[in-house]
């Protein structure tokens, strides 16, 4: 379906505001246009790659916005959504220099969640400004050796939250629960609903949904490496909670049942990662998934990306494949799948990329700034795929 002229005009207005008035005004124009588009009953899934969804247009605007914001970031602007560790926290001044009200400030605060399965700390990013409508929630699961601050800086997800108006939850793995701070995606006790780390992370999400008035139809989960593998577990075990998942350089749920089988699965060994957890094929959850994987990844074999999307392929699934490139960056192949039940799947193979978040910022670890922009593409995909109902 083609976007109507009014929506395109709104996007042009947002671009003009971005260049003249700043990102806050541009964000308001973007959100207003999206609400108007939704009220007209616009289709969620694009009919073809040449007919971009509104969220794809938003992604392009975000790319320009981040490019414009970088000089201010270097200068230490208070508007930086992923500032250095010494400057992270709450922004308390408005652009006019006046003290901001509580609704005008962004918060990046640390808390602890406890339930019967255990406890974990987490950081929560809440963008500035009071929203008239409930916001989405994106749960971001870091990789091994990372933490919330590192992952936020590398993915720049907080900058996207400022632009589009959503809350970001960063669960934190403790060294006491895994010496390398990996999520324990390979242990049977951490692959089940109501048990272990899936229970803790889902509980965190529900706590934030209740405390911040989150739109329960727009709760998403994404992760890198071990975090991506845990995101794959969560979308299977909690399909009533998470609307869609983003898995970057990760593995399918049920790929392993102990550390040796995990290492075998990471190396692409067939049959080494057979699960004892009773994991079900991801297609049976009926939840959309977007997958990124570098074809030069020597940490988690690229075949794991293939296995993540394989259950969604069938004789009757609609499939499209395109090869594109990022100017000055990596070529990539984008596979789009729509199952007969209408579940959308995207698989991005980034050519020449290793074990790193595509399009990420060098402010964080395990990032590849040569793109494509995995953060923006995941948000585009998420916004187009809420829970049905």
Image (cartoon, helix red, strand yellow):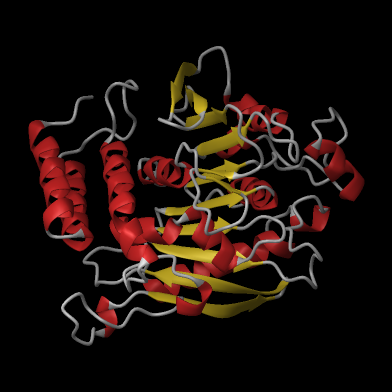
Is residue 126 in view?
yes
The quarter holding residue 132 reads bottom left
Left or right, 275 with respect to 228, comes to: right
Foreground residue, 87 or 35?
A: 87
- Which residue sits at x=84%, y=30%? 269
Residue 74 percent across, percent down from the top left: 38, 64
User: Seen from this angle, which residue lies furthest bottom?
Assistant: 99
Q: Quadrant of residue 255?
A: top right
Q: Is residue 227 left or right of residue 66?
A: right
In the rendered structure, the answer to whether residue 281 lies left or right of residue 342 reads right
Number of numbered callouts drawn: 0
Which residue is painted at 84% across and 27% down in the image? 270
Residue in front for this viewpoint, 386 or 149: 149
Q: Residue furthest top?
A: 315
**Camera-nearest residue between 71 and 218:** 71
Where is residue 109 drawn, in percent x and y? 48, 78
Residue 217 percent coordinates (x, y): 39, 53
Quadrant of the image containing the N terminus:
top left
Which residue is depicted at the point 66% across and 55% down?
143
Could you say which is closer to the camera, residue 286 or residue 61? 61
Residue 59 in picture, x, y percent from top left: 32, 42
Q: Is residue 165 visible?
A: no
**Taking 80 as reference, is 52 above or below it?**
above
């Amino acid at each position: 379906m083609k976007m109507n002229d009014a929506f395109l005009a709104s996007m042009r207005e947002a671009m003009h505001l971005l260049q003249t008035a700043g990102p806050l005004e541009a964000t308001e124009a973007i959100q207003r246009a999206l609400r108007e588009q939704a009220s007209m009953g616009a289709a969620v899934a694009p009919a073809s790659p040449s007919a971009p969804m509104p969220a794809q247009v938003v992604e392009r605007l975000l790319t320009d916005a981040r490019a414009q914001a970088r000089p201010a970031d270097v200068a230490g602007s208070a508007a930086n959504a992923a500032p250095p560790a010494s400057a992270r926290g709450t922004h308390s001044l408005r652009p006019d220099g006046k003290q901001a009200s509580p609704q005008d400030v962004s918060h990046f605060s640390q808390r602890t969640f406890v339930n019967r399965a255990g406890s974990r700390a987490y950081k929560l990013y809440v963008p500035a400004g009071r929203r008239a409508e409930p916001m989405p929630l994106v749960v971001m699961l870091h990789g091994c050796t990372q933490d919330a601050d590192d992952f936020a800086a590398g993915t720049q997800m907080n900058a996207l939250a400022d632009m589009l108006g959503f809350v970001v939850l960063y669960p934190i793995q403790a060294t006491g629960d895994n010496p390398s701070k990996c999520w324990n995606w390979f242990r049977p006790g951490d692959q089940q609903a109501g048990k272990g780390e899936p229970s803790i992370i889902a509980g965190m999400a529900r706590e934030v949904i209740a405390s911040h008035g989150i739109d329960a139809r727009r709760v998403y989960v994404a992760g890198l490496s071990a975090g991506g593998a845990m995101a794959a577990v969560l979308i299977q075990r909690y399909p009533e909670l998470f609307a869609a998942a983003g898995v970057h350089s990760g593995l399918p749920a049920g790929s392993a049942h102990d550390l040796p089988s995990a290492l075998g699965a990471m190396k692409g060994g067939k049959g080494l990662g057979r699960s004892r957890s009773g994991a079900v094929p991801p297609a049976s959850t009926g939840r959309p998934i977007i997958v990124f994987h570098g074809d030069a990844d020597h940490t988690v074999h690229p075949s794991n990306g293939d296995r993540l999307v394989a259950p969604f392929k069938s004789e009757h699934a609609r499939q499209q494949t395109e090869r594109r490139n990022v100017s000055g960056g990596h070529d990539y192949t984008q596979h789009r799948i729509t199952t007969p039940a209408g579940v959308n799947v995207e698989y991005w193979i980034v050519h020449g990329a290793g074990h790193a978040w595509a399009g990420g910022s060098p402010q964080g670890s395990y990032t590849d700034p040569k793109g494509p922009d995995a953060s923006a593409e995941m948000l585009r995909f998420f916004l187009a795929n809420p829970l049905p109902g």
